[in-house]
Image (cartoon, grey):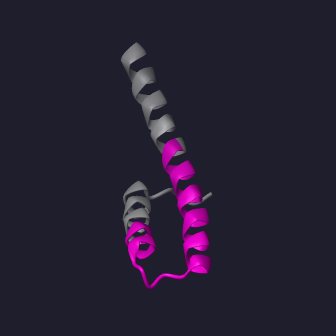
Amino acid sequence: MEKFDYAAALQELERIASKVEDPATGLEEIDKCIKTSDELIGRCREYLRTAREKVEELDRQ
């Protein structure tokens, strides 16, 4: 399993947001962007959830 790069995911989400806001972007491309964003957001949430669990575990020690 590859290591998740949270910072790179955020940069990609920002790039996607700019693309979606561009009036020249077609509906088909926006649909692809939404799907990619959904996947990235899910991975970011999982990353943050895991990080929070690790911090909570350290606090209990």
Q: Percent from the top left, x then y, of residue 10? A: 39, 59
Residue reaching furthest to the bottom: 24
Is 36 a magenta residue? yes
Magenta segment range? 16-45
Report the magenta stretch's main SS: helix
Looking at the picture, tell me which residue is in the foreground, 55 or 9: 9
Q: Percent from the top left, x then y, of residue 16? A: 44, 70
Q: Visible in this render: residue 16?
A: yes
At x 42%, y 22%, the residue is: 56
Residue reaching furthest to the front: 23
Q: Percent from the top left, x then y, of residue 4? A: 50, 56
Q: Quadrant of residue 31?
A: bottom right
Looking at the picture, tell me which residue is in the foreground, 27 or 35: 27
Q: Is residue 48 above or below residue 22?
A: above
Q: Visible in this render: residue 61?
A: no
Q: Percent from the top left, x then y, of residue 46? A: 54, 43
Is 23 a magenta residue? yes
Quarter of the image where the N terminus is located: bottom right
